[in-house]
Image (tube, rainbow, N blue to C red):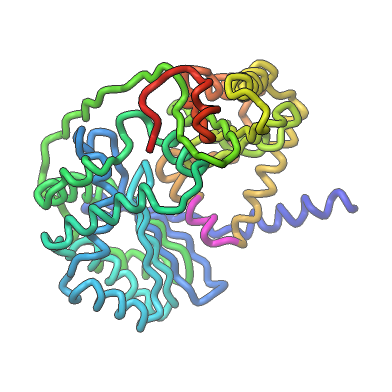
Amino acid sequence: MRLLLPILLATVALHAQPRVQPFVLPNGLRVFHLEDHEHPLVRAHLQVDLRPADTPAGLEGLSALTLRMFQASASTEGKSDDFDLLLESSGIQLTREATPTGLAWQVVARSRDQDRALGLLAENILRTVFDPATVWRQAAACWRDQEPLGVPAQVRLRRALAVAPGEQPTQASLSAINLEDLIAFRSRVFRPERAVLVLHGDLGLEQAKRLVLLNLGSWVGPALPAAKAAVRPQPTPEGPLRIPAPGAGLTLQAVAPPPPELAPEILALLDLLVPGDPLLPPVRITLEGCGLVATLEAGPDTAAPLALTTLQGRLLALGHRGYTQVELEHARSAWLARRSLDSLHPEALLAAALAEAQGRGATLGSMKALTLEALNAGLRSWLDPKRLRTGAAGPPEALAQLAPQDPPVK
């Protein structure tokens, strides 16, 4: 009975999950509705997809600056400060986020305020007019976000390794962006056929269709020619990235972005299997938005080349060893248990629905069909040494022991 109880609870929770009801507006906006009347709340998550060709070479940081302009510029509801006061007085939460794959808006409101909440979301996206006077101030703010004062060298190292060479925003690239670039980017990217809206909460399907059509049905964009792929030089440093940190300990890191072809179910299981693997100590691994992050905190008497060799060796050994069928089954059961609890966490439900809409979500059928050979092949592909971006942060005298490379990051 003690063994059956968790299974029964997981099964009940799994069946209690709201059913995803998709529909598409005439303008191409895809909507995924999850009806849930448990609480008088409505949540909306709108994401606009980004592609590598959207950002011209030399204008890195364009997406983050555009998001700041949405927040700082005026709309037909008034100035940005007036808009924020309106949100606060209405009890509506609206947040914005820039990720490598898209720009996202999240809205939380009481169900009685759902019309107002979706109206304000549409107001911010469709009717905000960028203020030319704020461009340079927001560009400076974006650079401060990239290089905030007081951030430890280890954190700066991870941020630097998380971005592919040639795609890291710089002060020069942010300063080069003008109002015309922002308007062109907005016209090119903010189109309904490139967006996904996930609704969750206390509203029915027909009510959701009416609400979305009323507020976002007029979202259209001019026909645009396909953007040319951004051509960026790909530097090939001779050694790991180095960030001097006088007086600090020596930290080695390796970041491996997931291969584009990695199946969502493999990614989900490796998220459960890799962290805490007994083969890894003294290396610590986490799976984050940028991919797999391996960290080694070296002692003061450890030579930097030896520490780097240890870090790379642990990752290589993990890829060669792989996992067993028993470990696969345990991870699959853990994934099912985690999935069954999503009905208790609306934000997890929204994230799962969005991932599935974008083809990044693991489904129950694909998870059951996953083989051990496919899992281990995905692990080896992810830990391919060619994919690793390595770096070190620590005292300059320790970094000097590593292979020469491009100038250290200041």
Determine if the magenta segment contains residue 302: no
Q: Which residues are magenta?
A: 345-351
Q: Residue at x 15, y 73 (%)?
A: 76
Image quadrant in which the C terminus is located: top left
Depth order, front residue of 334/154 = 154
Determine if the magenta segment contains residue 348: yes
Q: Residue furthest right?
A: 1
Depth order, front residue of 235/179 = 235
Q: Residue at x 11, y 44 (%)?
A: 223
Depth order, front residue of 261/243 = 243
Q: Position of residue 273 (x, y in %)?
A: 68, 34
**Residue 47 sits above or below residue 227 on the image:** below
Question: Where, by quadrant of the figure, is residue 68 drawn?
Answer: bottom left
Q: Residue at x 48, y 52 (%)?
A: 351
Q: Residue furthest bottom?
A: 89
Q: Residue at x 48, y 64 (%)?
A: 35
**Residue 238 sits above or below residue 177 on the image:** above
Q: Position of residue 204 (x, y in %)?
A: 43, 69
Residue 281 visible in rendering: yes
Q: Position of residue 219 (x, y in %)?
A: 19, 58
**Residue 287 sits above or below residue 35 on the image:** above
Q: Position of residue 80 (x, y in %)?
A: 23, 71
